Image (cartoon, rainbow, N blue to C red):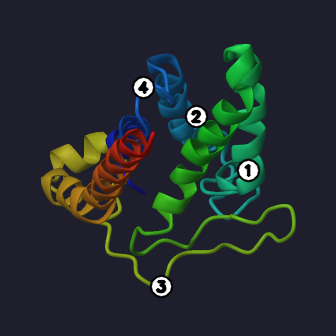
Amino acid sequence: MPTILTHVALPLVAAWGLGRSRISPRLAFAGALVAVAPDLDIVGRAFAVPHYALLGHRGISHSLLFAAALACLAVPFMPAGRRLWSGLFLFAAAASHGLGDMFTHGSKGIMLWWPLTEARFGWQLQPVEASGILGRSIADGSLPGILLSELLWLVLPALLLAVLYRRYRRSYIDLAKGQS
């Protein structure tokens, strides 16, 4: 799985790309929180929940339904006039967790489409190094390689899309101002 740093970075990069007029700092922070929430399923390890179980790691908490539920739970705390937009952003932020996990090599996949199926899905291309427990990655020296793979395959592409969107939006606004 990607590290918590990357799970937090993706919605923050998206928030920056969309701009403060659309994504408030409060909403960006909420996006970061819901993006890490699916990994709370690791608590199951303390109770001997098997990895492949519904409540196991990368089980139902990594599904699109869970992402939608997180967004729905958070939306009432958002400003009244912006709830639909907030809900869509929060859904995308929560869904980014599982979609990012699908890029990690050696993964058995996530239950993306639960409850429609309990099958686990992963991308064909899985270039991101699996991070495991952060303390272990520090101790065995693998953390720099893990962070580099996350930067190359997840954060930089997200940043590129954010920059392109900001440039497109700025040129579109300039064009619209010139026509009025």
Given residues 101 and 45, the one toward you in this image is 101
Q: Position of residue 179 (x, y in %)?
A: 42, 46
Earlier residue among tags 2 and 1: 2
Q: Secondary structure at mark 2?
A: helix
Badges 4 and 1: C-beta atoms under 8 Å apart? no
Mark positioned earlier in the residue sequence (1 or 3): 1
Query: Label 2, label 1: how many angstroms apart (C-alpha)?
Result: 18 Å
Whether pointer 2 and pointer 1 mark residues with C-beta atoms closer than 8 Å, the reply is: no
Q: Nearer the viewer, residue 152 or 59?
A: 152
The one of 126 and 44 positioned closer to us in this rendering:
126
Question: In percent of the image, x 54 and y 24: which residue is there?
Answer: 27
Three-letter residue code for mark 4: Arg
Q: Is residue 10 left or right of residue 151?
A: right
Under tag 4, what secondary structure?
Answer: loop
Between circles 2 and 1, the one closer to the viewer is 2
x, y percent for residue 165: 37, 52
Q: Is residue 110 above or below residue 36?
A: below
- Cα gap from disc 2 to disc 4, whole angstroms: 19 Å
Res 22 label: none
Q: Earlier in the sequence, mark 3 or mark 4?
A: 4
Residue for point 62% across, 65% down = 110
| Front residue of 131 and 12 | 12
Q: Which residue is mark 4?
A: 20
Secondary structure type for disc 1: loop
Please name which of the two marks, 2 or 4, marks the residue nearer to the observer. Answer: 4
Crowding near the residue tagged with mark 4, few <14, some 14–19, many ≥20 C-alpha atoms within 10 Å:
few
Please state the horizontal and vertical placement of residue 126, each as a whole percent of the image.
39, 76
